Amino acid sequence: MNRTVLSVGAVAVALAAVTGVAALTAPEEPASSAQNVGTAARKPVERSTLVCPSPSTSDVAETAYEAFTPKGGPGKKGSAALYAAERADPQDPEDPADGKDGDKSGSESGSEESDKDKNSEKKKEKSEDGAEGRDGAEKGNGKPFLSLGSPGSPGTPVEAETDDSEAPALTGTADGPFAPGWTVQQTTTVAAGAGRGLQGTSCSVPDTSFWFPGASTAEGRQDYVHLTNPDSTPAVVDLELYGKEGKEKAGQGSGEGITVPPHATVPVLLSTLTSEPVTNVTLHVIARSGRVGAQIQSADRKLGGDWLPPAADPAPGQVLPGIPEDATAVRLSVLAPGGADADLKVQLAGKSGRISPAGHESLHVKAGMVTTVDLKGLIKGESGSLVLSPAEDGDDAPDVVAAARVLRGKGSKQETAFVPATAPVQKRATAAGNTASGTTLALAAPEGGAKVRVTASAGSGGGSPKSTTVTLKAHTTQAFTPPRPADGKGGYAVTVERLSGGPVYASRTLESEQSGVPGFTVQTLPDDRSTVAVPESAQDLSVLNDDE
């Protein structure tokens, strides 16, 4: 891939040139919002916000970023850019620090400097190079970490790379034609040590609630939840952990009232939140004030590691698309967060239809308790999607959240990735950071058949888009190499558009073998939320009282 290796400051500039400035700040709406507003029209969002976690503290890690916005957004002027976030100690929100003091409340420790004078000097340097301070940066006084302005434009991806072990978390916005569908992929290769392998994640939209089934506080594994605040006011966050017996007893860190300063990130080690190691836990992140981006970075001494993104919101049924065809182990974690037990049917939607895994056709999930099952022999040389549905029809089926840990390889050459349940593609979804080899797209139609258009963007180094139409049969999953740009060079983005039919669920897998280890990472592809329901002006007037 034709990328340039850059320092942290230079990467900021390169990404700014890639993405311009785009952020998804359209109001949060429930799925039924379109019905609530009657004949409300769907309009392109005008501003989008994204948050990318700090990629790695390893000295043998290399991180690649790719930012992309599909064509078709409104207007001609706009931009999209990401800026470095300050690393903060949750114990001292007024004076963000990188040091070991954060250990007391679960923040990551290690080789970072803790001396106050050195921290002050670091802040001064960041201020001088423009990496700190969103208010000034958005007025043009700072240097973005990654942007999509010139030479980037909608329809053309922009790339940057860094091997800095202190590479920061990023926050930023996009507006105008860069806002609808703005997507940034962060992919890290870790050559050795805990978490070695391929770690990837799509930068996320900030929110106030996140569920993470599949997390762990077991010995030999380190799971950090990265909390990043993109806004100019502090956020206060609570962390709740559930195990097989219900809510876990607090450890040395309570997980309550964690302050995340403006434009800052706080990493919290989950094992500090439990009194003893727990192999399978579900984390609930709740922002009691403000909003944050949240993702878990998992590192295992023997099984590699990856990012665990938030799962889809609680619902009676869930779909986990794109279990790789050569998966050697699949561990499913499910939690019913409400007050009622859930009984689920467990099925795999494969190439030919749905099947029930032998011995695991159904699953009983006790309310508030994590249920975990190892689906041995689930995959037999054929990619598929896990489909969880209520065992009995009815409108009162309890909600659940779910995710799967997937292993590839054998013995000391095993590697880990996570597949959380995801929302369907309502209109369009995009996966950035694809490569000429080692990219697989999985499309699932667990209910009715569907027709989908898959488009490869131009490459970051040139070329032209290329599209294909895929017809999905009901109850199946198709996994295939997506189209590549014609005469394209560098990385490229893949856009999935649902044209007709039933719900479509999607994921993208990246593979890269390293010294015999089958490195891989899976990103699920929910809808890109590029549009928002806007009531007609007549509807707004209709809510007025007759005497007004």
Image (cartoon, rainbow, N blue to C red):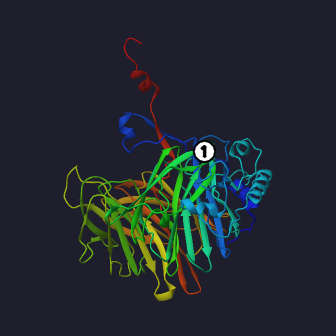
Residue at position x 36%, y 78% from top?
A: 379
SS type, badge 1: loop
Front residue of this view, candidates 314 and 452: 314
Q: Name which quarter of the figure residue 140 lies in.
A: top right
Give above or below for 122 relative to 332: above
Q: Is residue 24 left or right of residue 111?
A: left
Q: Quadrant of the C terminus?
A: top left
Residue at position x 66%, y 42% from top?
A: 76
Q: Name which quarter of the figure residue 377 lies in.
A: bottom left
Q: Is residue 70 visible?
A: no
Residue at position x 39%, y 39% from top?
A: 34
Q: Where residue 359 appears, x then y in whole percent?
A: 23, 77
Q: Is residue 444 left or right of residue 272?
A: left
What count of labels does the image hold? 1
Q: Is residue 271 visible?
A: yes
Front residue of this view, candidates 5 and 528: 5
Front residue of this view, candidates 281 and 545: 281
Mark 1, other Cα within 10 Å: few <14 / some 14–19 / many ≥20: many
Q: Quadrant of the N terminus?
A: bottom right
Q: Where residue 471 appears, x then y in whole percent?
A: 39, 63
Front residue of this view, candidates 334 and 502: 334
Q: Residue flagged by tag 1: what amino acid is it?
A: Asp
Q: Which residue is mark 1?
A: 231
Residue at position x 55%, y 51% from top?
A: 181
Q: Where residue 187 appears, x then y in whole percent?
A: 60, 68
Q: Is residue 450 left or right of residue 293?
A: left
